[in-house]
Amino acid sequence: MIATYTRRELMVVAAAREIHDGEVVFVGMRLPLLGFGLAKATHAPTAVGLFENGVIRDRPAAAFIYTMGDPPNIAGAVACLGLNDVMSLLQQGRVDVGFIGGAEIDPLGNLNTTRTSGSGSLVRLPGSGGGCDIASLAGRTVLIMEHEPRRFRERVDYITSPGHFPGRRRGGPATLITTLGVFDLSSGQVRAVSLHPGVTPAQAQEATGFTIVVDDRVRATTPPSKDELGYIRSADPEGFWTGEPMKSG
Amino acid sequence: MIATYTRRELMVVAAAREIHDGEVVFVGMRLPLLGFGLAKATHAPTAVGLFENGVIRDRPAAAFIYTMGDPPNIAGAVACLGLNDVMSLLQQGRVDVGFIGGAEIDPLGNLNTTRTSGSGSLVRLPGSGGGCDIASLAGRTVLIMEHEPRRFRERVDYITSPGHFPGRRRGGPATLITTLGVFDLSSGQVRAVSLHPGVTPAQAQEATGFTIVVDDRVRATTPPSKDELGYIRSADPEGFWTGEPMKSG
Amino acid sequence: MHEVIRQRRRDLTLIGPISDMAFDQLIAAGTVAKVIAAWVGNVAGGSGYGFRRAYEQGQPRRIVMEDHSNFTVGLALKAAAMGLPYLPTFTGLGGDIVRGHPRIRPVDDPFGGPGLLAVGALKPDVAIIHVQRADASGNAHLWGNLGLTVEAAYAARRTIVVCEEIVPDEVIRSDPNRTVIPGFLVSAVVEEPGGALPSSVQGYWRRDFETFLSYHRLSKTVEGFESWLREWVLDLRDRPAYLRHMGDAALEPLRVTDRRLAAAANFAP
Amino acid sequence: MHEVIRQRRRDLTLIGPISDMAFDQLIAAGTVAKVIAAWVGNVAGGSGYGFRRAYEQGQPRRIVMEDHSNFTVGLALKAAAMGLPYLPTFTGLGGDIVRGHPRIRPVDDPFGGPGLLAVGALKPDVAIIHVQRADASGNAHLWGNLGLTVEAAYAARRTIVVCEEIVPDEVIRSDPNRTVIPGFLVSAVVEEPGGALPSSVQGYWRRDFETFLSYHRLSKTVEGFESWLREWVLDLRDRPAYLRHMGDAALEPLRVTDRRLAAAANFAP
């Protein structure tokens, strides 16, 4: 029997599986942070995490943090440098994988977190933060999205974090993890790798504002194990990030 | 009655007089370092000293140092940054005055500390160190030289530390302190401000490989006071830098 | 920040990579004409409603937004800190942030490599820096989160150091590598314990998360923001009054009382 | 450094701003083909005789010299550390160092300001860094003199950390701001107390000035250098042997025994 779990929890597990042992990971907050901690606790014990504010950790913070600058994320870090220092390492190509969230995405993996008129009226979003830098400079990127038609657009209003484009020097979107499934972006189209248990190919296509590649016999995302759930719930005891519904990025 | 003193000691006093209170000073080793300490102890108590290795001091080291990286120069410093940090402050224009020594000089205040064939055969000198950077970027520079004909040349073999040149952004050589006198370089020619006691205008001209401007009634460099000598001898008790003869730069 | 609002400053330009709710408050209070940043919102909750009202509806006034990534803000300040007109970078290529950007232009690699972007220097008139301790000359010890604090202090025309404690200069001299801002760059030193709240200060204050959440809730509406502004800014004279208004019950849990000291470092010569 | 000579390495390129006598020894021992530096000599005495013999007479072999200023070396390493092909600067304009330099070229300011120089990135194959302490993963605490240590470690393809002490990782974690080199940049960690002598290590070793002077005297002649090399390098197996050969009478006065500890910094969350 498999414990019940939220889609957020399943996404954390999927994010963790994108991290290989020994890799240098540009960690975001929220789900990717939990994914990094889960990967460290399971299959990637020697992975190292960089935060855009300059913090470098080889183990997650001992207490729950709301932002990467919170004191528990600095206490016990192996290094606390400046923003430009870790960005320089990122630009050097020393970062294997980075995580980014977005409000809108297109088939090339371009992310918009700046402004949109998709819903008719102009909506201002917070902006890039480090997203554009991770998208531009990491060895590969893993994108995390709420899977809704209005967010999956043929062309995003504003390219905050560049996806695949001619002349890209390095990296680009590799994987997209959504509330409905896990998708491969490496080919410049959105191809379903797995859909979360209970999600049909038709539902996935309906929830996407453009055509995706999804095999009728596409496998189901492997659910979290008891241990994986145990870790996630100890790291996010109140479900601040992993409870329903997902907080919008 | 005036205490006897060496020419090196007189040069230290002359160097100290080039530092105004409240100024940010790019300090070298040897005579300028003693001059900085003397200025701090007398007329420029609030001057701040930068060292090219990243050290920032508002008082001289408590013990004699051979190099700016020696532990006594770090202990008690107000800041110990990196080389690029202090060089960045220098490039920003935050440094009022810098001191440079040279093996050869020309009328424009160009200094050569790289290589020379002046004496016939090729002689390799240590090189720029921070000299070129100070000459290029400081608000003004004070040059310290052994006054010998072979060192004062119409044109130096190699411009290690640039003097006056068309299109200079900032600064340039202001004052030259030698074993024979103190000279103004701001006008693009070498003009005697004072000659050390006992040095005649003719001797100064003879010791210079090009024509200098020296008034027959040029004043004598004011000798060190007892207090000034007291400071210098406490800072350089064995005369490592201020005894005769001068160590070549 | 709150004093800036009390003084009814106008037409300010705000600069920062990831802004905290202070930006939202300054914007919603109408003090801001322009924002140069990579992310403006509430680090706890997401959207900054005051920022959105100003940007989307021009309430209480229109603002000009200069969008950046964290790295381009960092490079713009670093360029000024280095005394350079620009710094080159590869970040942003292929995206819209750098397209037609007033401070970012394409530039060639003089050594024949692929093209880059030049990020123009950004020189703030004033940088306000909160640190743990400084001496009376402004030599400042900062530890924990650094972000772009040092770049901002180097780049700015005037730097104001706000510290938890003004300490004897011997404390600063005991660890010159901890001095991230040399005093000769500092125009003023202010001793203001808790001056960074609701943000955290390593070893002194925890993040006041409740205030982030309640501000986020209230600032959803103009009325909510106005009442928040009155209660927490306009009706309070200064920072001590703010801390008194919070009350010990709210303040004490935020105060760091236990000790996790840095391992000894010997500077003996 | 001495082990490099014992292994009879050849055709090395040395990189550094202000070189200490180690450069002179490596050059005089014939291990060096090229030097990229701002200053090569003996910081105590001035001229580096081994360097001069190689440069002036090609003894024991010709060397190629790439002359720099301290800042251009610093910028070349910083460019590589930042993952950039170059960094711009104003230093050196009007002088001969930058004229026809293989790594320095004129470049325009894309914002229309005065012209600058571009210093090309310098990416060492190996950086050897001496620090006070590191953990087994290479996370290194360094204090005191920094120079270009951090830039070199970031820029190099491989970084070797030599430390006075390998410490438990909790010591490093207690002060993450003191970690100047993150372990994932480090290829190897070597515990070698006194490994930096005759240079100083803040809080551990004073400068061994006598050795600088005696080397300076002896290295005036080839014969003098050869005898010095035999006694202090070739006839000694390793660094402990070097320290034994120095003898306690010479070694003990160099050891820092008193304590001037950095003021406490609390990292408690």
Image: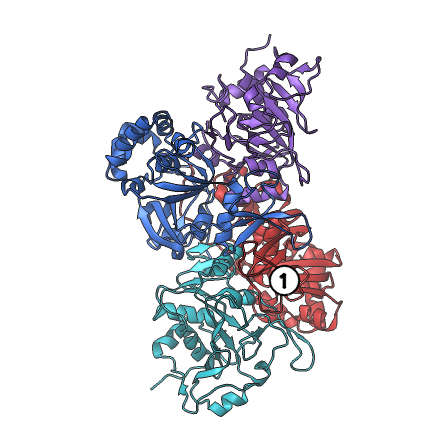
Chain colours: A purple, B cyan, C blue, D red
In this picture, residue C214 sits left or right of residue B90? left
In this picture, residue A140 sits left or right of residue B145? right
Label 1 marks a residue whose chain is D
Q: Relative to C145, is B163 above or below?
A: below
Name which residue type carries label 1. Answer: Ala
Q: Relative to A27, is A86 above or below?
A: below
* Disc 1 element: strand
**Residue in front for this viewpoint, C10 or D266:** C10
**Residue in front for this viewpoint, A195 or C202:** A195
Residue A223 makes an appearance in the image:
no
Tell me where residue D206 appears, x and y as whole percent.
52, 59
Check disc 1: other Cα within 10 Å, few if <14, some if 14-19, many if 20+: many
Q: Residue furthest top?
A: A1
Tell me where residue A183 appears, x and y as whole percent.
65, 23
Q: Which residue is mark 1?
A: D37
Residue B123 makes an appearance in the image:
yes
Viewport quadrant of the N terminus of chain C: top left
**Residue in front for this viewpoint, A187 or A33:** A187
Tell me where residue C14 appears, x and y as whole percent.
41, 43
